[in-house]
Image (cartoon, rainbow, N blue to C red):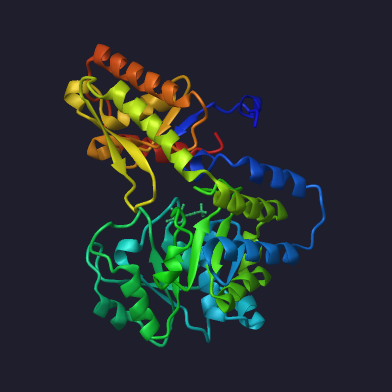
Amino acid sequence: MARSNIRSRLGLRPIINVSGTMTALGASIVVPEAVRAVSETLPEWVEINDLHRKASKAIAKATGAEAGFVTASASAGITLALAGCMTGPDLAKIEQLPDTTGMKNEVVIQMGHMTGYGAPIEQAVRLAGGVCVPVGNVTDARSYQLAHKITEKTAAALYVVSHHTVQYGQIPLEEFARVAHDKGVPVVADLASEYDLKGFHAAGADIVIYSGHKFLGGPTAGIVAGRKPLVRATFLQNSGIGRGMKVGKESIAGTIAALEAWEKRDHAGVRKLETSYLDLWVKRLSGLPGVTATIIPDPTNNPLDRLMLQVNAEEARITAWELADQLAAGEPPVIVRDHEAEQGFFQMDPCNLHPGEAETVADRVVHELSEARKRNRPQQYSYTERKARRFERLLRWPD
Ligand SMILES: *Cc1c(COP(=O)(O)O)cnc(C)c1O
């Protein structure tokens, strides 16, 4: 699809995203099939619950689940699925939320899964009136601890699969589900950026949640899939707290199209293209003074590799976070995956690049590294200062 000049018309910077599918960067490059479905749906009336019925079928087909529901976001999906576990299909209870008087409202979750994705997951639980009951400690959770925390007040057991969580010492999903099911508690799994749409039901999740706008390349939406009674109870929250998180017809239609496109996508071809970008970056960047370029696998085993660029500040004469900032400040701005930059590296994600952008990214990194060596000042500001500056800027919005 031909690209427009919409960003310059709006006065926005023409960023190149090698960070990943981030909400802060526009979530995704929406696939042409979904763009078409969105624009064809917008000017038409539809009976929205019939469109939801069609989406349920499309989600069931793509995930192997009994039913599915499109929400405003994965975060909304977590809140609404948990609400469904508390209320069931009882409309009076649905209208009563987030007051959970007379309902089970505790949600057990491993401490190492109590993460954030721009907002704390714990707040997504509280929005439904739920209360997180942490299991274990950050780096060690055990089945008997989980069993001990499940009581007659437990509404659900929440499991998170993500690079955001602690990556070791956690209870595997199969074992987590076995313990929860022994106590009659449903398992809700947040899989927002996991490519595997089918395996998690087999592993024991009763209801799973994906983002529509990450790897799927759909419009902003969340996808809930699972056992029919639970998905129905989630859908019925549209008459309660879900109203404030409603999804429009265009996102429902766009999500159906994105799921269909995902099934037909040439995944091997996409992988090959991404690998060619990574190879190009390794070729251009390794051997430059003070940096080491390594291809690393995705931490949760998605079929995706990234480039890790380690920066030796003394030798490169710039820190990893300052290099990331220079790349973001330059022309064109390149946004790297820098959430671990305090450890002296950042990553570059090869997904969703437009033709020619991989070369531009390599040129920009080479340029900034050569500028840094001319300046010869290994560090100008600390990671802590950088972090503080970012919050200051956020708090000044809209200025
Ligand atoms: C991105 C993400 C979310 C939030 O997804 P949205 O669809 O943007 O609300 C939730 N959980 C995890 C693990 C994520 O990666």
- What is the x, y in percent for residue 323? 32, 26
Is 184 positioned to the left or the right of 137 in the image?
A: right
- The residue nearer to you, when weighing 182 against 5, is 182
Looking at the image, the residue that sits furthest to the left is 314
Query: Compared to 213, does 229 lie above or below?
Result: below
| Residue 174 drawn at (x, y percent) | 34, 72
| Quadrant of the snapshot with the C terminus | top right
- Residue at the farthest top position: 374
Q: Nearer the viewer, residue 103 or 150?
A: 150
87 vs 186, nearest the viewer: 186
The residue drawn where x is 60% and y is 42% is 31
Q: Dividing the picture into quarters, in which one does residue 274 lie?
A: top left
From the viewer's perspective, tell me whether residue 387 is left or right of residue 16. left
Inspect this view and state whether residue 171 appears: yes
Quadrant of the image containing the N terminus: top right
Decide: is 148 above or below 381: below
Percent coordinates x, y for residue 242 in the rendering: 62, 66
Q: Is residue 373 above or below residue 218?
A: above
Residue displayed at 47% across by 39% down: 270
